[in-house]
Image: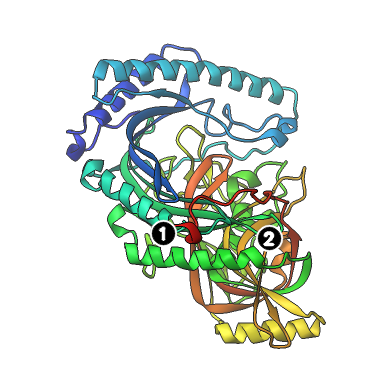
């Protein structure tokens, strides 16, 4: 039954309204024949700002605020409830599962907020009741089997963070409009650059979570991002993009003008080189993956395959499910996920939180220890031999949380310098009779398939790739390369690890939407990788000269 609010949160009017209505709903449900055994309310109270500029001109500027309610409700019991995977044929269609939601007023109107909660709860109860009846009907036709619980029992906690200052105290709209214009204006003067956008985004969210088990959690989330995205038209018409991004918990922590402007100038130089760079042919052979690329590599080929939620599904490929306590990496390597840390060295990480989206306290999870698989990332959806959550249930507001990555970190007790890795690459190229190997310097992201109904493969999108020639010729920038493969084959080819970590900060999209994540890894030497050409994205050459060029200013 519901536990009263903490003493120091009594002044939080919104929290008290939500908790009071939850108490009332629990009492009301005692009057029905099939009451829910679990109810949870999540309210996102968010302020956000976004500013965009292109080629020195402001294209968008907005500051907004919204409050939204989401409800989770379970009928049955912890062993079997409405979420039970009774229909195996339907598993191949698993995807985004939306929660009942409603907009809430911004002014703490008790009557209106309570009424909205009641309406959404009633609608979700009706939907869940039908879902549970379907589960019971299907199970009635099957032979009884040993069942893993559908929902784990976890420690019930109460936690409260004080409200943060209003967004206008940390965000100066006019200042960021000027900054984005200033940054994007640097791209003017080169007609082959077909797009040049700089965007600033900042949000601060106060998230409420209360449940009929007694949980009462209020925590704050904030993040400031700058995205620089530009593309150039190559001589053959191919449009080639390049990206830079920056993250800090608040705008004041973002890099200064000098750093960003210097990065943009370097970006323009690289774009001009890409304009004349040769198109790469499909390749198989040795490669070096710089730290951020290796981080995305591990996120895609490994991280998604140790998220416990999908391993319970018979439609999943379950690549590593049966490999617990097996060696899957060199014995010097370790992998862990840690949402409790906010930085790696001096670099801010964005996959951190105190409690996950099911009200479970976050924790560091050692996944691979000395090359041996030890654990999975768990939500409150149990798995064989993994009956409890380790605080990795995450989801975009409005989507049902499932087990997801947070801050993924790869390290090794045996490392090589960058020069040593390069020599290993050249030596292996000679052994395989290859004229060159690849060096993947930067990446924009990637995706992977983990189900059984499509190739269980991954695809990573590098943006800066170089050929390293064995005969000593200068490294050559190339374009049009995608890194592809299958996870077990790629893991077997990892031969050496660098001595310096790189960090990739971004967002990951999966069954529960887009969540902030970071991937930290040293550089990797891989004996054999496979690449393919990127899809064609060509733009015909313009017939008229651009209006603003150095020759006619």
Dot 2 or dot 1, earlier in sequence: 2
Task: Determine whether 154 is above or below 297 in the image.
Answer: above
Q: Determine which residue is flagged by label 2.
A: 235
The residue under the point 66% across, 35% down is 94
Mark 1 neighbour class, 10 Å CA radius: few under 14, some 14 to 19, many 20 or more: many
Where residue 477 appears, x then y in whole percent? 64, 71
Task: Determine whether 459 is above or below 207 in the image.
Answer: below
From the viewer's perspective, tell me whether residue 265 is left or right of residue 138.
Answer: left
Q: Which of the image's four quarters has the C terminus?
A: bottom left
Task: Determine whether 244 is above or below 144 in the image.
Answer: below
Which label is found at residue 215?
none
Where residue 490 appears, x then y in whole percent? 71, 66
The Cα atoms of the two marked residues, 2 and 1, are separated by 38 Å
Mark 2 neighbour class, 10 Å CA radius: few under 14, some 14 to 19, many 20 or more: some
Secondary structure under tag 1 reads loop
Can the viewer see residue 407?
A: no
Picture mark count = 2
Where residue 400 appears, x then y in whole percent? 51, 35
The residue under the point 78% across, 64% down is 282
Q: Which of the image's four quarters has the N terminus?
A: top left
Q: Nearer the viewer, mark 2 or mark 1?
A: 2
The residue under the point 25% across, 19% down is 110
Task: Determine whether 123 is above or below 145 in the image.
Answer: above
Where residue 45 appears, x then y in whole percent? 32, 34
From the viewer's perspective, tell me whether residue 196 is left or right of residue 511.
Answer: left
Colour option used:
rainbow
Q: Determine which residue is flagged by label 1.
A: 349
Secondary structure under tag 2 reads loop
Can the viewer see residue 252?
A: yes
The residue under the point 34% across, 15% down is 115
């Amino acid at each position: 039954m519901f536990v009263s609010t903490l003493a120091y949160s009594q002044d939080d009017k919104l929290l008290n309204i939500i908790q009071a209505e939850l108490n009332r709903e629990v009492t009301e449900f005692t009057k029905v024949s099939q009451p829910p055994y679990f109810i949870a309310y999540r309210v996102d109270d968010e302020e956000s700002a976004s500013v965009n500029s292109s080629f020195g001109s402001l294209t968008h500027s907005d500051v907004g605020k919204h409050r939204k309610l989401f409800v989770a409700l379970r009928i049955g019991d912890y062993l079997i409830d409405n979420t039970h995977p009774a229909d195996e044929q339907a598993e191949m269609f698993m995807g985004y599962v939306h929660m009942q939601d409603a907009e809430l007023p911004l002014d703490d109107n008790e009557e209106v907020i309570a009424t909205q909660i009641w309406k959404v709860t009633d609608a979700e109860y009706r939907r869940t009741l039908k879902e549970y009846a379907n589960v019971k009907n299907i199970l009635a036709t099957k032979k009884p089997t040993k069942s893993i619980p559908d929902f784990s029992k976890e420690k019930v906690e109460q936690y409260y963070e004080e409200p943060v200052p209003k967004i206008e105290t940390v965000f100066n709209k006019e200042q960021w409009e000027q900054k984005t214009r200033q940054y994007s204006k640097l791209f003017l003067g080169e007609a082959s650059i077909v797009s040049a956008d700089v965007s600033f985004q900042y949000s601060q969210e106060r998230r409420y979570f209360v449940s009929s088990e007694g949980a009462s959690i209020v925590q704050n989330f904030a993040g400031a991002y700058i995205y620089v995205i530009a593309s150039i038209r190559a001589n053959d018409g191919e449009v080639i993009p390049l990206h830079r991004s920056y993250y800090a918990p608040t705008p004041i922590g973002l890099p200064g003008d000098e750093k960003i402007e210097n990065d943009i100038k370097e970006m323009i130089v690289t774009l001009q080189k890409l304009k004349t760079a040769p198109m790469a042919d499909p390749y198989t052979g040795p490669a070096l993956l710089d730290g951020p690329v290796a981080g995305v590599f591990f996120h895609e080929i490994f991280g998604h395959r140790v998220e416990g939620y999908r391993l319970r599904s018979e439609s999943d490929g379950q690549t590593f499910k049966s490999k617990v306590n097996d060696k899957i990496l060199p014995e010097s390597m370790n992998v862990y996920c840690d949402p409790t840390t906010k930085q790696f060295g001096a670099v801010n990480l964005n996959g951190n939180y105190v409690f996950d989206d099911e009200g479970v306290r976050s924790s560091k999870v050692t996944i691979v220890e000395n090359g041996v698989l030890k654990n999975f990332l768990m939500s409150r959806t149990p798995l064989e031999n993994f009956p409890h959550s380790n605080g990795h249930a995450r989801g975009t507001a409005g989507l049902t949380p499932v087990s997801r990555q947070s801050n993924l970190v790869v390290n090794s007790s045996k490392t090589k310098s960058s020069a040593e890795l390069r020599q290993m690459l050249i030596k292996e190229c000679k052994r395989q009779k290859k004229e060159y190997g690849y060096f993947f310097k930067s990446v924009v992201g990637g995706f992977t398939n983990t189900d059984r109904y499509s190739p269980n493969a991954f695809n990573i999108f590098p943006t800066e790739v170089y050929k390293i020639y064995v005969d000593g010729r200068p490294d050559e920038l190339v374009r049009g390369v995608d890194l592809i493969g299958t996870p077990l084959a790629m893991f077997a080819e990892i031969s050496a690890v660098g001595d310096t970590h790189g960090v990739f900060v971004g967002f990951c999209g999966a069954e529960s939407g887009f969540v902030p994540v970071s991937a930290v890894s040293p550089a990797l030497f891989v004996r054999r990788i496979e690449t393919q050409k990127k899809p064609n994205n060509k733009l015909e050459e313009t017939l008229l000269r651009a209006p603003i060029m150095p020759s006619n200013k």
